[in-house]
């Protein structure tokens, strides 16, 4: 019995640490990196808080150093997936009734563990598993993850405080129940923060989860589970299963208790899952919530009034940080003829100063792409560009997978605004540029809007406010996150809620109240203060 309405701690964004060469912070990360590199980690399944090993395993290797074995992870069979459902449903009985303050404290503790004792380890595991530089690991695995955990507590509290008006003589209340059943979280390789949040957000709202991480993020997924457990998460609230994604998904979607899916990944996979849910709809006890944030073909358009140097910096950072493997990464660029040369000269000279290699060497700005499949896809796109008479290569174009999956930052210039790489998501360090006539700015806005199926992020660079206004209007539905005079990447939780529409997702804005609302099913409770005891209304007379 609490007899109080406690306020949660006010969330503020976790400051990004600079990791200057030689600093204590960078030394701690380098030490954690070496330890994880050498220790041969074994990642079991987590079912009902217990660690399960199976006879079936897969290997973990750093993408920038794929001859080195980091360890193995265990793969679930159908039985283990069914056990995950059972343990989620069993855990739900107590978790869904646990007061919000206790649930919230667990995730706030997880945030503090990540900010303090686990910071070096979560960053190092992300550098190894996903080949992020220390800066990219810090803004993702430490800061964004911490921000998700802290801000979600504040947003959940705001939701719970939203109550209906009570008219004369009644008290109306809304109770924000968790969904009836379990939630299935499926995460992509590219953000450790997203992997953690896809489970943590619905769990904070009282749901229990079966989580399937990406095969290409297993080392950092393992650290996420460790942090949740250390923070005091009870058994069965988040169950981690790895293995054949199709078998796992089909097994979970066949359960009558499937209550919702929290997916981030590619558009094709999400559409396929949605279709399966539709086919199974008669099985379910409740209409499942379907939340999916998916692919992008993110744009930068520069107006003739833009400053060349600013546009160039937006392109270099927006397209090539983390090897272009952010869903928000700029991958198609529209430049006015009058400024194109100045902008592209600057881009090329910046790229010449960039070095590529292992994230362990902090001089490197670019490291490897995630796996052989990605490497092959990107190499093929570059080969096609080399063979096309509509494309010239302004920078890069070399690939080497002998030690790691290295694809040089590549700038393609095309004369065809509908060329393949202007509309297809490549998910790598390749940007395609199209030059338009200055007088065709408005027509080019239409082109930007209509060239791709996606609508995730986009940016306009312009000193002319009328042109910026025009772009905002013409591109209203072309991006869920729109940037003026800035690169289209780097959304911060609590400041720029993230998500796009069209083929880019359901736009439920991760890191905002809008997302948390998807994980509750409100119950209205009405109580008259004086309960009527006579059926007759006054109009009936005496
Ligand atoms: P992916 O679609 O290959 O994998 C995502 C998850 O789906 C993984 O866990 C994977 O194992 C699983 N999966 C694969 N096949 C499946 C199947 N048949 N059934 C069920 N699950 C299956 O994506 P990825 O390569 O890990 O991540 C990159 C993609 O994610 C890009 O398209 C990117 O744009 C997108 N992304 C979007 C956002 C966003 O907020 N919109 C954020 C991050 C990444």
Image: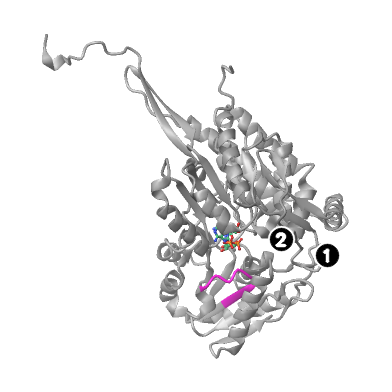
Task: Judge by depth and name the residue closer to the eye, 211 or 489.
Answer: 211
Residue 429 belongs to magenta span:
yes
Percent position of residue 287, x then y? 41, 44
Tell me the magenta residue range: 424-432
User: Which residue is painted at 43% across and 74% down in the image?
Assistant: 447
User: Which residue is painted at 68% across and 60% down in the image?
Assistant: 216
Percent position of residue 54, x then y? 71, 51
Residue 107 belongs to magenta span:
no
Res. 71 image quadrant: bottom right
Ligand number 1: quarter of image: bottom right
Q: Where is 305 relative to 261, above or below?
A: below
Can see residue 371?
yes
Q: Where is 537 relative to 352, above or below?
A: above
Q: Main secondary structure of the magenta part?
A: loop
Apparent side of residue 173 relative to residue 237 in the rendered image (left or right): left
SS at circle 2: helix
> Which image quadrant: the N terminus?
top right
Label 2 vs label 1: CA separation? Answer: 15 Å
Percent position of residue 374, x then y? 64, 71
User: Which residue is painted at 83% across and 50% down in the image?
Assistant: 25
> Which image quadrant: the C terminus?
top left
Specify few, some or many for label 2: CA neighbours under 10 Å numbering under 14, 14-19, or 20 or more: many
User: Which residue is painted at 54% across and 62% down in the image?
Assistant: 266
Q: Where is 190 relative to 410, above or below?
A: above
SS at circle 1: loop
Say whether mark 2 is within 8 Å of ligand 1: no
Percent position of residue 90, x then y? 58, 34
Q: Provide the residue designation for mark 2.
A: 130
Can see residue 138?
no
Task: Judge by depth and name the residue closer to the eye, 223 or 454.
Answer: 223
């Amino acid at each position: 019995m609490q007899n109080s309405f406690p306020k949660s701690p006010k969330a503020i964004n976790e400051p990004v640490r600079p990791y200057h060469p030689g600093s204590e912070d960078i030394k701690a990360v380098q030490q954690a990196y070496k330890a994880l590199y050498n220790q041969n980690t074994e990642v079991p399944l987590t079912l009902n808080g217990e660690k399960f090993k199976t006879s079936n395993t897969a290997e973990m290797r750093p993408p920038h150093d794929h001859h080195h074995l980091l360890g193995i992870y265990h793969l679930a069979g159908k039985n283990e997936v069914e056990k995950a459902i059972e343990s989620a449903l069993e855990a739900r009985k107590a978790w869904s009734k646990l007061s919000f303050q206790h649930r919230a404290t667990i995730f706030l503790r997880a945030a503090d563990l990540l900010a303090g004792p686990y910071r070096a380890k979560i960053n190092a595991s992300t550098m190894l598993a996903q080949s992020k530089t220390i800066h990219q690991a810090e803004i993702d695995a430490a800061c964004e993850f911490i921000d998700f955990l802290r801000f979600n507590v504040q947003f959940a509290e705001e939701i719970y405080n939203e109550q209906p008006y009570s008219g004369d003589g009644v008290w109306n209340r809304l109770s924000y129940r968790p969904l009836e059943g379990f939630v299935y979280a499926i995460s992509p390789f590219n953000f450790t923060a997203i992997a953690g949040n896809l489970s943590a957000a619905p769990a904070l709202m009282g749901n229990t989860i079966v989580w399937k991480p990406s095969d290409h993020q297993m080392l950092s997924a393992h650290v996420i589970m460790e942090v949740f457990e250390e923070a005091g998460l009870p058994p069965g609230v988040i169950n981690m299963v790895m293995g054949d994604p199709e078998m796992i998904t089909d097994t979970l979607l066949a359960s009558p208790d499937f209550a919702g899916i929290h997916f981030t990944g590619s558009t094709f996979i999400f559409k396929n899952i949605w279709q399966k849910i539709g086919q199974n709809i008669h099985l379910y006890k409740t209409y499942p919530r379907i939340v999916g944030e998916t692919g992008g073909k993110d744009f930068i358009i520069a107006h003739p009034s833009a400053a060349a140097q600013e546009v160039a910096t937006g392109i270099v950072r927006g397209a090539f940080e983390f090897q272009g493997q952010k869903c928000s990464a700029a991958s198609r660029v529209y430049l006015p003829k009058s400024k194109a040369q100045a902008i592209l000269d600057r881009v090329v000279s910046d790229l010449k100063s960039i070095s590529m290699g292992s994230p362990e060497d902090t001089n490197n700005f670019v490291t490897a792409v995630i796996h052989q499949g990605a490497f092959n896809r990107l190499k093929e796109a570059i080969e096609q560009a080399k063979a096309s008479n509509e494309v010239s290569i302004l920078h890069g174009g070399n690939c080497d997978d002998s030690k790691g999956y290295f694809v040089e930052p590549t700038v393609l210039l095309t004369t065809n605004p509908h060329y393949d790489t202007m509309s297809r998501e490549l998910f790598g360090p390749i940007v395609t540029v199209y030059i338009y006539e200055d007088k065709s700015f408005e027509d080019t806005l239409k082109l930007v809007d209509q060239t791709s199926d996606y609508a995730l992020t986009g940016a306009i660079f312009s000193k002319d406010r009328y042109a910026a206004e025009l772009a905002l209007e013409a591109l209203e539905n072309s991006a869920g996150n729109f940037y003026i005079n800035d690169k289209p990447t780097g959304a911060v939780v609590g400041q720029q809620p993230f998500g796009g529409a069209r083929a880019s997702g359901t736009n439920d804005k991760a890191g905002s109240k809008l997302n948390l609302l998807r994980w509750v099913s409100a119950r209205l409770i009405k109580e008259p203060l004086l309960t009527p005891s006579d059926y007759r209304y006054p109009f009936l007379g005496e």
